[in-house]
Image (cartoon, grey):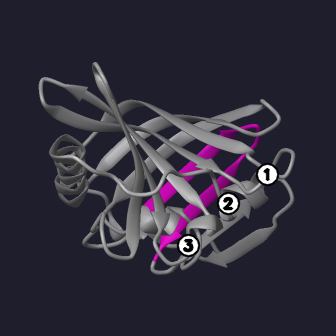
Amino acid sequence: MKGGALAVLLGLGACATRPGLGGAVQQGQVQRVETYLNGLHGVRAHFVQTWPDGGTGGGTMAYDPGHMRLDYVSPHGMQMVAGEGHLTLHDDQNGSLTRVALSRNPLGMLLRVPLHLSGDIRVTAVQAQPGSLQLTLVRTDAPTEGALTLTFSDSAGQLALVGLQGVDARQHRIVLHLTDVTEGATLPASLFTPPSG
């Protein structure tokens, strides 16, 4: 994987956040996202990933509550499976297998079932623009250990997840942009079996 991207992907670090959110409008947006994410299942999409050095890769994504899989076709074959408390990455090029806990990985916030955007998860920013909505999440007890920004299209009151972004402690960003997103498919549990090498 390019330029430290694995370290960034597996350990998305801290970003500057602003304390607290107020107002019924922002709280309403947070509730919309929570309701949407808790009803989201059977997602398939293509993704393009941008790494801190500006390089890109891509492939296909699958998501079901509590689980995510990324199958890279560029820059070379890799499989990443996250769920059941761990993230596992297999690199086809060199055969390496990396496994880390999700307990302190920002991606773990998205994979909670059910997902509550309060309590031990804190929303630090809500950005609503015509046709789009972004929420930034941190762990309440460890806000400097990582942040995750979720991007949604927002059309006619309907949300759709179209991107994820992490920022590390050095302000290096890693971005996944989703296209051709479909929801509601039946995904076999075997799809989320961690790679074993």
Q: Which residues are magenta?
A: 67-83
Q: Residue at x 18, y 41 (%)?
A: 25
- The three-letter amino acid code for the residue at tag 3 is Pro
Q: Quadrant of residue 194?
A: bottom right
Q: Quadrant of residue 197?
A: bottom right
Mark nearer the viewer, 1 or 3: 1
User: Which residue is label 3 attached to?
Assistant: 194
**Residue 104, percent from left and from top:** 59, 75
Is residue 191 in view?
A: no
Dot placed on the residue nearer the N-terminal end, 2 or 3:
2
User: Which residue is label 2 attached to?
Assistant: 13
**Residue 14, percent from left and from top:** 65, 58
SS assignment at label 1: loop
Q: Is residue 148 above or below residue 97?
A: above
Is residue 33 in view?
A: yes
Mark nearer the viewer, 2 or 3: 2
Numbered tag placed on residue 170 in the rendering: 1
